[in-house]
Image (cartoon, helix red, strand yellow):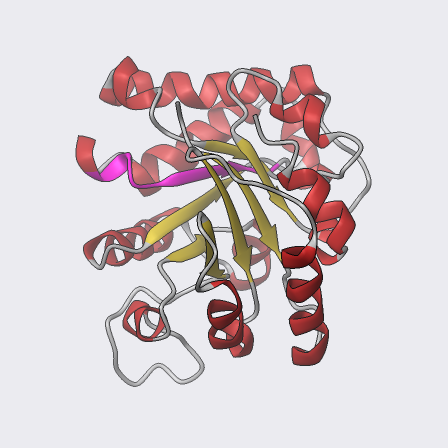
Amino acid sequence: MRKQIAAANWKMNLTLQQGEKLLDDIIALPHQLSEHQQAVFAVPFPYLAMAQQKIAEKKNVFVAAQNCYNKKSGAYTGETSVEMLLSVGVHHVVLGHSERREYFNESNQFLGEKVDICLANNVTPIFCCGEALSVREANGQNEFVAKQLEESLFHLSTVQIQEVVIAYEPIWAIGTGKTASSAQAQEIHAFIRSQFAAKYGDAVANNISILYGGSVKANNAKELFSQPDVDGGLVGGASLIAEEFNAIINSLK
């Protein structure tokens, strides 16, 4: 069975003390992850070492960075390398979140370079794709997402692509309270999987986890995750509330 993943994206929220308490509270709540299930916490850079220490003894629980740079090292003030992430025990990183694309002008090519350096260092990219409301209203979401995948990922080998986690995020549903219906989520997730199948074959496509990332909450997670091509969620606001995120973890199939 494909990995089922509940990934928390804290974004630029919480102080160190608040982050410590949130992790403590979530860890203390009752949940049991099966072999094919994972919980991932994408925390701000200053909290990576703290979070890694908190979850070090937890099975199938991981810490992720929210970004990394596309170079190994050098004069890139303010950036963080994959090597730095590895040095604090972090083996996952979120790449291409819509906020990075929109506010920091990260292109598909640039993100492809980040994917490459992650995979070369055995770091799992959680690669985000998705469309804005204007694209969805024009019914152009399939072509838009297909271009993101093709330009950032389709140079990868059959082995490499299976190391990438995909997070589909309808930008119109992030932080707005709007959520794609479970049928809408399934439709676009199935389309994404079909793109991988066309490029790499059905067996490879069926081994790639595709997460939904648009206003996932405790009260809609189970229905969303029950869809055959939805393999969990990349969760924003609800991941900042211990009971909410714990319920989302427990909604994994």
Residue 95 in view (yes/no) = no
Going by the image, does 61 lie left or right of 207? right
Q: Which residue is drawn at 63% across and 43% down?
A: 31
Please say whether residue 167 is one of the residues in the magenta stretch.
yes
Query: Left or right of 157: which side holds 181?
Result: right
Residue 8 magenta-highlighted: no
Which residue is more in the foreground, 116 or 65?
Answer: 65
Closer-to-camera residue (241/30)? 30
Q: Where is residue 18 in the image (x, y as percent from the top left)?
A: 72, 74
Residue bounds of the magenta highlight: 160-169
In screen coordinates, is 178 left or right of 49? Answer: right
Residue 197, position as x, y percentages in the image: 31, 17
Taking depth in this image into account, of 45 and 221 the one nearest to the observer is 221
Judge whether 227 appears above or below 232 on screen: above
Is 174 placed above or below 92 here? Answer: above
Relative to 129, say whether 29 is above or below.
below
Q: In terms of image quadrants, where is residue 57?
A: bottom left
Residue at figure coordinates x 65%, y 79% from the top left: 16
What residue appears at the point 76 percent right and 37 percent down from the top-left corner? 218
Task: Decide if residue 91 is in sight here.
Answer: yes
Q: Position of residue 73 (x, y in %)?
A: 25, 78
Residue 159, x across and y down, in percent? 18, 35
Quarter holding residue 217: top right
Quadrant containing the N terminus in the rendered view: top left
